[in-house]
Amino acid sequence: MTLDMDDLLNSILGSMDRISYIKSEDIPNIDLYMDQVTTLMDKKLKNTSRYPGEDKILTKTMINNYAKNNLLPPPVRKKYSKEHVLVLIFIYYYKGLLSIHDIQSILNPLTEEFFDKNEAFSLTDIYDGLIQHEADRIDHLKEDISDMLNQSKGLFENAPDESREFLDMFAFISTLSFDVYVKKLLIEKLIDGMNQKKSSTRSDEKRSEKMKEKNK
């Protein structure tokens, strides 16, 4: 069975149009028990998994581990707020790409400043802004992927005919993988820079406190 690359492209682009997001308004404004949280996440994100019938979007063990590793603020009387669910969605998307330590570096400043804060600019505002931004970028991403596939198709024109289909696919997969690799390196560099800045700020604060103690 041969796989037509143009059919593949149309299938990929069509699936991108069907990417589903959990909208903030889809999350109840009442606090939820853990079972209710896992059911909500499973219902809303099941179709984003590779094997929808087998993959677990979120389990009780995962939630407990996230809280234990300071990725998720602790529940209040065993209940999780809407903002808890938003943080869990961020973790879901990050965990396929980043380490627990890197996710912690990103989310801790976010939750420290915006989690459960009764201010004009909330965690929900941040989430909604990012979701809209990503939705607006779909057309650009589709064009980028189309270019990658078209370039991959002509990469091994001199290869034997019987190997051309596999090599076209191999080239496309390798191009996508390198794209992800470069972006992952960039993300890690950005996180390292954030951590260095945070560490430097803490050192400055400690030195300042020592100076104050000496001058007393």
Image (cartoon, helix red, strand yellow):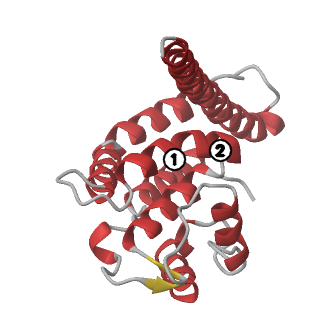
Report the Cα–Cα distance between label 2 and label 1: 15 Å
The total number of labels drawn is 2
Q: Classify residue 53 as left or right of residue 109.
A: right
Q: Mark 2 against mark 1, which lies toward the viewer?
A: 1
- Residue name at image x 56 percent, y 20 percent: 193
Q: Residues within 10 Å of mark 2 (few under 14, many from 20)?
A: some
Mark before the other along the chain sequence, 2 or 1: 2
SS assignment at label 1: helix
Q: Classify residue 130 as left or right of residue 112.
A: left
x, y percentage for residue 10? 47, 52
Q: Residues within 10 Å of mark 1 (few under 14, many from 20)?
A: some
Q: Which residue is mark 1?
A: 107
x, y percentage for residue 211? 52, 12
Question: Which quadrant is the N terminus positioned in?
Answer: bottom right
Can you say whether 192 is above or below 135 in the image?
above
Amino acid tagged 2: Leu
x, y percentage for residue 169? 70, 40
- Residue name at image x 65 percent, y 44 percent: 97
- Residue name at image x 48 percent, y 60 percent: 87
x, y percentage for residue 64? 68, 71
User: Looking at this view, is 62 or 54 the one in front?
Assistant: 62
User: Looking at this view, is 161 or 54 the one in front?
Assistant: 54
User: Looking at this view, is 195 or 134 the one in front?
Assistant: 195
- Residue name at image x 63 percent, y 75 percent: 52
Q: Are marks 2 and 1 in contact (CB under 8 Å)?
A: no
Amino acid tagged 1: Leu
SS assignment at label 2: loop
The circle on residue 155 is: none
The circle on residue 97 is: 2
Can you say whether 129 is above or below 149 in the image?
below
